[in-house]
Image: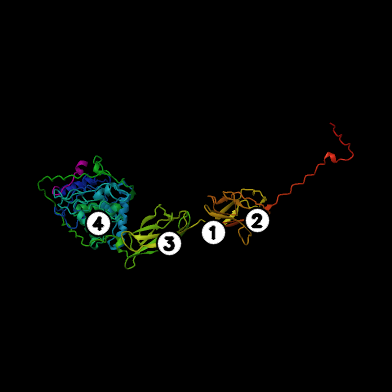
Amino acid sequence: MAAHLGRRLRRGATSGAVVAAAVAALAASQGPGTTQPPADGASGDLPIGAGDSTAPPDGSASGDSPYYTELPPLNTPNKPGAPSSTLPIITGPAEAGIPASVLAAYQRAEQSIRSTDPDCNLPWQLLAGIGKVESGQARGGAVDANGTTNSPILGPVLNGVGFANISDTDNGAYDGDSTHDRAVGPMQFIPSTWATWGQDANGDGKKDPNNIYDAAQAAGLYLCANGRNLAVKADLDQAVLSYNRSREYLNTVLSWFEYYKRGTHQVPDGTGVLPGNRSDNPGTRPGARPTPTAPASPKPTAPKPTPSKPAEPTPTKPTTPPTTDPAAKVVRLTRDGATSLRATAGGTFVTRPTVLAVDLAGRPVAGVQVRFRITGETDARFAVGAREVTAVTGSSGKAVAPSLKAGELTGGFAVSATVVGRALNAVEFTATVTERSADTLTHVDAKELAATTGATVTGPVTVKATDGGAAAAGVALTATFVTSATDPQPATDGPYFKAADGTAVRTLTGLTTRADGTYELPEIYAGDKAGTFLLRLTAPGGGTATITIKVTAPAPEPTPTPTPSPSSSTGGTPEPTPTS
């Protein structure tokens, strides 16, 4: 049965009875399963239905490229027309998982288009349904960090042999075929359609049909063409049929649309559900390069009676090209909130740069990419470690930069904001980094220091800096011997520090507190003058501490008593004079 269902259903070779049998067989299978693009393309079987034609159809984004009719959820109760009571509650099955970048692209396209064309009511789940049918969600999310597929996703050659006949329109630029066109990318656009509807949704300067962000944005705009309201069933059907003129295609897409509306979840890129019984096909694995192959000619078959069907609706060809980018509507950026930013060295700026994008009528514009750039001599960086970042405006038209972290270099710099891809005047914010501060300095020992002239002060002498009650690390201190507590002037005599060359120094600068806010002063020399002296320490932020040093003269040494010589004694007998 699996082999039978894996066969492609080709135009002219499939009757309504065969289609009904295939769908019935699928409905009897267990749970949802997916199929994946073959090695030569991202699509599967040809569209089936009254709209099939060998001529290039009008208004078809994919050129009516083939797709896999066996795609679930035709094998589940969750299909168009089923009573709501029979629809399963989705609680996280594998089939409900959508790769992260692919899901982000669909949701971003919805947000962007709802801001520029709210009356369309585009749901991202519709893009997910088309993406599932057209490419298995970009081959299970096999995309790089920018959302571009790891290898091109190409539909079959549209050379009229079993498929529509569409001559080359892009000189092979997108599909590598300079003779015929092929549908390209995760949303399967033929090059001629992409030339009109292609988008640059990820702001890399290219409109790439192989990029899921660009392709999803273009698909959403295409579906919304001609003033369609996708909340209206007739407009929804017409939009899907304009993508591929097949009733079977419509039913399959709407099945996935309803399925995703019941619940979905995000899975890592490259881990989307892969097709069963195709592990030997390198074209179905993420990152594999598709190998183009010529489609086989359909075998002639005897005519079979075809049950009559109601006439298919004729899709209207989109005639109004989309707005190429929300940024095109922006006439100016304005600052929103504070215009100046301040932080202490090593700290985080409390205020984040924020701008508002507005159109000619002053209305906010969503989905606009805004580039924030740090300029000037500074080591400040955005929280991601870069000098330049890009943010996207939300529904309020506001774009907020990531948190800005100050470095050790104090002084001023600027942050500019510009609209990506536009030459509008930049908006600038002034930013200032101030040195670390402390509002309090304390002498840890809290006692008077004493020394005698010519000696050193008993140490160590330690002070602690705090700011708002918390230890203030990295604060620059200044220590100066002063003449008075009320009128502190630098002293010219008394205690001192020693410079590296041994000379006396009575002012030290650039002393930096440790992680716990403390600093241990170098050795203090008492000098040769007795008296009471003051050592004053100051910190940016107002913290001060005054330490008293009392210098006294050393106690005089006692005078020794002279010892009398024997010759000075009285009453003694004189020594005899020696004779020769």
Q: Residues within 10 Å of mark 1 (few under 14, many from 20)?
A: some
Q: Are marks 3 and 1 in contact (CB under 8 Å)?
A: no
Is residue 471 shown left or right of residue 179? right
Q: Amino acid at mark 2?
A: Phe
Of marks 1 and 2, the one in the foreground = 2
Residue that carries the numbered disc 4 in the rendered image: 198
Residue that carries the numbered disc 2 in the rendered image: 533
Of marks 1 and 4, the one in the foreground = 1
Dot 2: what SS? strand
Residue 388 appears anywhere in the view: yes
Q: What is the spatial separation of the Cα atoms under label 2 and label 3, in whole angstroms?
A: 45 Å
Examine the residues drawn in magenta and state their main secondary structure: loop
Q: Earlier in the sequence, mark 1 or mark 4?
A: 4
Of marks 2 and 3, the one in the foreground = 2
Outermost residue, top side = 580
The image position of residue 575, as x and y in percent, is 86, 35
Of marks 4 and 3, the one in the foreground = 3
Q: What is the spatial separation of the Cα atoms under label 2 and label 4, in whole angstroms?
A: 80 Å
Q: Amino acid at mark 1?
A: Gly
Dot 1: what SS? loop
Mark sitting on residue 541: 1
- The quadrant in which the C terminus is found is top right
Dot 4: what SS? loop
Q: Residues within 10 Å of mark 4 (few under 14, many from 20)?
A: many
How many marks can you see? 4
